[in-house]
């Protein structure tokens, strides 16, 4: 399969793509008419309406004439999906191939994995239009220690005319149940490795993939997930690095990803129509699909965040949440067609699912329908008198509702629902389809620091339409900017990202505009570029795109030894207000087992500030360009500064291994307040 570079698309190709979209849409609307036809009582076309069969006590089969899905009963594992001439698109040779799991433990105890196997099968809905089935399990105290303390209801919906499986889960713990921590909740599909060998997770991130056997024959690099393919079956992959974390994505962009089989040409896609049930807001990153071939729906995880993100329950706290529905979608084209059409069609289907959200066919009182949800709108302004005399629009700011908390708390919030949107260029926003409940309204965005929170709690009730009117966010500011490094955007993406080692590459990321940071081993390039002396940045001379390494890492000095590193920012002051207070703003985009200390003009002096030990987001090792956001505002007494050259020393003092360090988002020095 040959992939065009989407960035080089000419206007003509764009037009063709548009025409194709229209064509696909018109085919689809014909399908919808047929669907209505089918559901019309008495007119159903035999064999096309969805049918459910209890094959045995251990097996339930649902068939809509397009796909045939086999479930183990009452466990509720998906054991088979028959589609378009493939007997099983899942991997028949292993037991676990379509399942939910939860990583959990009682505090201080060993980590457990629970596959949430049901003990009871039930039919929720069965008509010509759809079948909804349920596999449940009820927790009791006698199960303590062996099963995650949750009541489980796994639901699957198969609809007439829809080539896929809708999946959702209702997880609940009752008041008084034992303490528990949960690190991860997800759905996993392990696909047929003889068929699926091409992976697509976005327009730019698509490639032929090595197999699990290739990984088993490979050399493990600095951690077990990253391997150097030394002996792959397909020699094309030889010398490449494979690591599932290279295929991570921010949740806001993680709507469709999956795999393609070329013979027969079939696609298998995970479609996530809403981000409301995931955790940590729009830029939480997580896994998508990866070598196996594996496709995931990650509902919660501590990836790119750390334990701050885990769900922990103490003192008998009750909880209930609906995860999903998500759609495992299958498609096919004729062997004469390009299999890339499968990706285009998966995107079309994703857009269709997003438009249909919230679904009107989900049969659970825990899943509110559209009329049971509410809407909130408003307009955000930014007030920063050192940028503009008038308030400016909160252009393209993220605005969201999340459980009540402090400003910024949404980024580690893991138990409730979150509803985010992006304001328009005038800061206007509308958030629709919010579940009834109490929330705080939060905002943050490109170009300004810190976190906004609306002072009132927001109560959404069924059908409510709230307008909060103009809101004004005043980002932290004490005086005019003397200098700044980077752009406030919560990532280190604008800084210098080195070339990877030629012997440790993923070819997908050799020439991208966006994704250079996803290569393996970039942390070690620091010692190559700065073998003796650390980075020195001179304000007015240096350019942060070239001269500011994307991560403040340790220096590998060989023999498994790492040195801590001190970066310098040199800046010139023509005059100094010796009695005033200057303010240094340091916004971090990531931190892993680090301590950042700040000194001014004397590297041997006591530090004027330390973050203390922070961070478990592991974004350096996992090729993320950010983890959690942290903003520090540090007073710098004027009498520490001099007319002429001054130096700020930034020391990341911890240096046990290669993955410790911070990423900066943005640094700014403000002079004392002036009128
Ligand atoms: C059912 O579909 C056929 C063919 O598309 C159409 O001719 C017919 O009018 C439809 N019937 C109904 C009741 O919509
Ligand atoms: C929301 O807050 C109000 C007022 O504090 C309270 O009466 C109500 O029970 C809360 N609703 C929910 C769903 O928590
Ligand atoms: C908002 O709700 C939280 C949580 O219920 C509560 O602690 C807080 O006092 C409320 N704040 C206001 C301003 O009502
Ligand atoms: C490497 O470390 C070991 C153990 O600390 C030491 O014995 C050895 O001399 C070191 N080698 C080099 C080249 O520094």
Image (cartoon, rainbow, N blue to C red):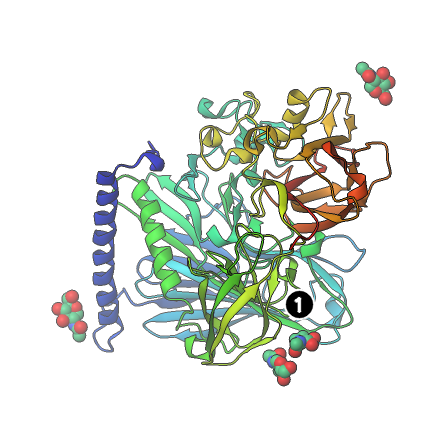
Picture quadrant of residue 65: bottom left
Image-based side of 381 in relation to 426, left or right: right
**Disc 1 residue lies near ligand 3 with CB under 8 A:** no
Q: Nearer the viewer, residue 101 or 521?
A: 521
Decide: few, some or many residues near mark 1? Use Cα within 10 Å; few <14, some 14-19, many ≥20: some
- Does residue 596 lie above or below 412 as drawn? above
Identify the residue at horizontal 34%, vertical 60% (top origin): 352
| Residue, disc 1 | 405
Picture quadrant of residue 51: bottom left
Could you tell me if residue 74 is visible in this image? no
In this rendering, the count of numbered labels is 1
The x, y position of residue 339, in whole percent, is 31, 40
- Give SS at disc 1: loop
Quadrant containing ligand 1: bottom left
In the rendered view of the protein, which quadrant contains the C terminus? bottom right
In the rendered view of the protein, which quadrant contains the N terminus? top left
Identify the residue at horizontal 53%, vertical 64% (top origin): 400
Q: Nearer the viewer, residue 491 or 646?
A: 646
The x, y position of residue 311, in whole percent, is 68, 61
Q: Nearer the viewer, residue 422 or 469?
A: 469
The x, y position of residue 85, in whole percent, is 32, 47
Image-based side of 207 in relation to 37, left or right: right
The x, y position of residue 199, in whole percent, is 43, 40
- Does residue 349 lie above or below 489 as drawn? below
Q: Nearer the viewer, residue 41 or 525?
A: 525
């Amino acid at each position: 399969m040959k992939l065009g570079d989407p960035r080089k698309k000419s206007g003509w190709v764009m037009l063709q793509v548009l025409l194709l979209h229209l064509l696909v849409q018109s085919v689809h609307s014909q399908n919808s008419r047929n669907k209505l036809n089918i559901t019309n009582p008495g007119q159903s076309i035999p064999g096309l309406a969805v049918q459910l069969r209890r094959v045995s006590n251990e097996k339930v089969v649902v068939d809509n004439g397009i796909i045939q899905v086999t479930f183990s009963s009452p466990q509720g594992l998906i054991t088979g999906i028959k589609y378009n001439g493939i007997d099983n698109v899942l991997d028949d040779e292993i037991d676990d191939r379509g399942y939910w799991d939860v990583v959990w433990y009682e505090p201080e105890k060993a980590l457990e994995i629970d596959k949430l196997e049901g003990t009871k099968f039930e039919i929720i809905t069965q008509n010509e239009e759809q079948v909804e089935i349920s596999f449940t399990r009820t927790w009791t105290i006698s199960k303590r220690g062996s099963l995650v303390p949750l009541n489980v209801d796994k639901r699957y919906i198969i609809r007439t005319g829809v080539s896929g499986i809708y999946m959702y889960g209702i997880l609940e713990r009752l008041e008084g149940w034992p303490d528990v921590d949960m690190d991860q909740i997800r759905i996993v599909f392990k696909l047929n490795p003889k068929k699926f060998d091409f992976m697509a997770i976005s327009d730019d991130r698509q490639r032929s993939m090595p197999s699990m056997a290739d990984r088993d024959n490979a050399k493990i690099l600095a951690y077990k997930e990253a391997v150097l393919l030394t002996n792959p079956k397909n020699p094309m992959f030889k010398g490449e690095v494979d690591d599932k974390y290279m295929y991570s994505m921010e949740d806001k962009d993680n709507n469709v990803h999956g795999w393609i089989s070329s013979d027969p040409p079939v696609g298998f896609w995970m479609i996530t129509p809403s981000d409301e049930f995931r955790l940590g807001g729009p830029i939480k990153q997580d896994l998508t699909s990866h070598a196996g071939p594996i496709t995931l729906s990650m509902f919660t995880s501590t990836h790119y965040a750390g334990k701050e993100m885990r769900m922990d329950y103490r003192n008998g706290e009750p909880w209930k949440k609906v995860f999903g529905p998500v759609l495992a979608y299958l498609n096919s084209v004729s062997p004469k067609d390009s299999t890339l059409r499968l990706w285009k069609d998966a995107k079309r289907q994703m857009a269709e699912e997003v438009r249909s959200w919230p679904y009107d066919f989900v049969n659970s009182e825990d899943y509110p329908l559209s009329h049971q949800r509410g809407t909130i709108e408003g307009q955000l302004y930014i007030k920063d008198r050192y940028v503009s005399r008038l308030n400016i629009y909160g252009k393209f700011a993220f605005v969201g509702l999340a459980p009540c908390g402090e400003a910024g708390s949404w980024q580690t919030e893991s138990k409730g629902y979150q509803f985010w949107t992006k304001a328009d260029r005038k800061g206007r926003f509308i958030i629709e389809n919010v579940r009834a409940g109490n929330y705080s309204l939060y905002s943050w965005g490109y170009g300004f620091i810190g976190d906004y929170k609306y002072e009132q709690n927001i109560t959404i009730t069924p059908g409510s339409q709230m307008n909060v009117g103009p809101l004004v966010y005043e980002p932290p500011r004490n005086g005019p900017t003397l200098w700044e490094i980077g752009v406030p955007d919560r990532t280190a993406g604008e800084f210098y990202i080195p070339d990877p080692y030629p012997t440790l590459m993923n070819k997908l990321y050799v020439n991208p505009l966006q994704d250079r940071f996803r290569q393996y081993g970039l942390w070690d390039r620091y010692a190559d570029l700065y073998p003796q002396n650390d980075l020195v940045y001179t304000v007015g001379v240096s350019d942060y795109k070239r001269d500011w390494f994307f991560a403040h890492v340790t220096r590998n000095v060989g023999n498994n030894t790492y040195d801590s590193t001190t970066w310098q920012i040199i800046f010139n002051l023509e005059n100094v207000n010796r009695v005033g207070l200057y303010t240094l703003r340091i916004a971090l985009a990531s931190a892993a087992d680090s301590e950042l200390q700040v000194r001014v003009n004397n590297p041997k002096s006591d530090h004027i500030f330390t973050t203390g030990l922070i961070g478990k987001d592991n974004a350096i090792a996992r090729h993320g360009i950010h983890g959690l956001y942290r903003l520090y505002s540090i007073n710098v007494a004027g009498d520490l500064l001099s007319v002429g050259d001054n130096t700020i020393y930034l020391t990341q003092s911890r240096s046990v291994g290669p993955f410790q360090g911070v990423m900066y988002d943005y640094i700014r020095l403000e002079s004392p307040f002036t009128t």
